Amino acid sequence: MIRGIVGALVLVALLPPLFLTRDLIAAIYFTFLFMILAVNYDLLGGFLGYVNLGQGAFFGLSAYAVILLLNSGGLDALGATDIPVAMALAILFTLAMTWGFAYPLFRLSGAYFAMGTFAMVLLIQQVIVNFPGLTGGTYGIYVNPRHYLSLHLAYYLALGLLLLSLGLNLWVTRSRLGLAVNAIRESELAAAAIGIDRFRVKRRTLLLSALPSATAGAIFGLQAGYIDVDAAMGVEKTLLPVIMAMLGGSGLVAGPLVGGVIVRGIDIVLKNYLHLAFPALAIYGMILMGIGLLMPHGVLVFLRKRREAGFRSDAGSFRA
Amino acid sequence: MQTVLDLALGGISLGAIYALMAFALSMALATTHVLNVAHGLILVLGAAAATYLIQVRPVGILAALAVVIIGAALFGLAFESVFVRQFLGKSPEEILIGTILVTFGFGLSVETLLGYYWARWVHPTPSFTLSFPWPHLRLGWVTFSGTRLAILVLAILAIGAFHLFLTRAPLGKAIRAVAQNYEGAIILGLNPRLISLTVYIVGITATAISGVLLALAIPLDPYTGTRLTLVSLTVVVIGGVGSLPGALLGGVLLGIAEVLTAYTFGAIWSPVVSLLVFFGVLVIRPEGLFGRGSG
């Protein structure tokens, strides 16, 4: 099924820039960015069972890093290669920060881990806001127009990155690392007993989940031309990916994609086509609430259970 | 001398509010494993209701407080039966993921509607703030902030009431039993539904009251909720889940740390310090400074 979805997605996604309006291209491009974050989130949240409410931190850190690097002028000597070099450095910087954060974060599990990751984002946000001289503080920073990324280029880069992220998740499910990740999710104690170095496996998974997010953040920063803390790592960037993954079906490779299509679809329709008497965010929240109450395991699992219910009364484990 | 007194009173009274608001979250986490992301919003709702009933359409202080408390209890009842009850008995992981989704959606829609309609019907820039009738009290040659003192007294009364409830009342003891050992408590015949219902009615009432107290100290707006949720979580992490003395000490520590930071480095650094405290505690003692070690 995943192959069918991805195939259809690629075919449809390659064409739009040729005939859609700029607004819609931008909306689909943002959908790709959110899907990348959701797919990355699920590596940790779905496969490892560690709910990371801070996926946006990797995205935002890298967006800030790439803009600050380019604005500093230190890379001007490189000529045309300055953008890729700055992106690579920003991603490396983000991975280094992630490496550091792994130490306090993985002392936690369950609800505490979720809280810890959320606190990580807020800490980074606050530190960025508190150094207005460097980061522009609450006003945000602009990209020098020389370094803008065009929407079309960003669109295709995001699409490619989304496919790579999906490939990464698929690869993890089939790799030795994936086996270790699975073992840890099922039982930390048993995983430790058979000699899995749990911290290293978790840290590696966290770094793998941060890598595409950081790349997406660098693309986002340069395409947007202007970022502030809220745009780079606000509540939307940190929590929507989690919601998309949960909505589609956490722990399934296709889950975040399905969730992403639903969430962004609702968002685009509410904001652009329905003219409501009150803010669309309210309806959006209610839909999330309803889905959480009615299909707590996500749409894919809900559908699979409904199908299986035809054969058996008890659908049993959904991760089989 | 005056400065030291002001800082101490400011820090301790802020800490007492933090303790009260964190305590409800801590109790809910310990007994039902529900992570209520909309916890801070409940404070905001309490503050908004009090502001409306005391300053916008004055109905008298006592009537206003009665309405806020009864309203919060009913809200707790509804919250438990709609959002919590169906997660009872599931695995902690399922509860965590399900409730984050549900409470986030709830918080998002309520804060959006609150901000939108308050701006439309009441005041274009929503701000929930209350003022205490005696802002300054003179005692000998030092002046106390009457507001801070009132906050401190009220918060201590509320915390004391909860402490008595948890240690003396049969239902309160049952709550502690469930928090310590869910299966064991159920085998002994305690009713998990009744306990979860009580935890939410009592907890949400306490949270709404702490919202009213917080509105006395600082102005709130419809979107302060997330930050308050995180402050509560920080206190829970410092104090350990399900521990009332822990929440009290954690709250006061955090309150004093924030006030001192604001005084020395400026108010923009106090959130950073509270987050650093949060991470510091996690690294040194993930089960909380006062937790029982089963984190």
Image (cartoon, rainbow, N blue to C red):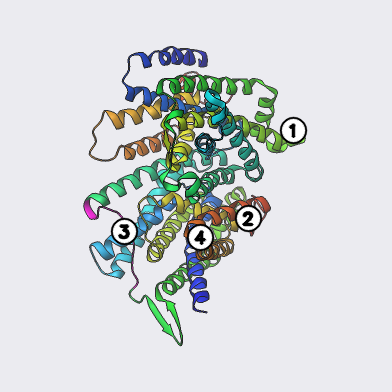
Task: Give the amino acid at mark 1.
Answer: Ile
Which structural element holds mark 4? helix
Tag 1–tag 4 contact (CB < 8 Å): no
Q: Which residues are magenta?
A: B121-132
> In the picture provided, is A263 more to the left or to the right than A238?
left
Q: According to the image, label 2 marks what residue?
A: B288
> In the picture provided, is B232 more to the left or to the right than A169?
left
Q: Are marks 1 and 3 on the same chain?
A: no
C-alpha separation, residue under disc 4 versus residue under disc 3: 29 Å
Outermost residue toward the front in this view: A77
Q: Which mark is residue A196?
A: 1
Q: Main secondary structure of the magenta part?
A: loop
Q: Residues within 10 Å of mark 2 (few under 14, many from 20)?
A: many
Image vertical order of residue B224 relative to residue B87, above or below: below
Q: Which mark is residue B49?
A: 3
Name the residue at 63% across, 37% down.
A96
First along the sequence among labels 4 and 3: 3
Q: Residues within 10 Å of mark 4 (few under 14, many from 20)?
A: some
C-alpha separation, residue under disc 1 versus residue under disc 3: 53 Å
Disc 1 sits on a residue from what chain? Answer: A
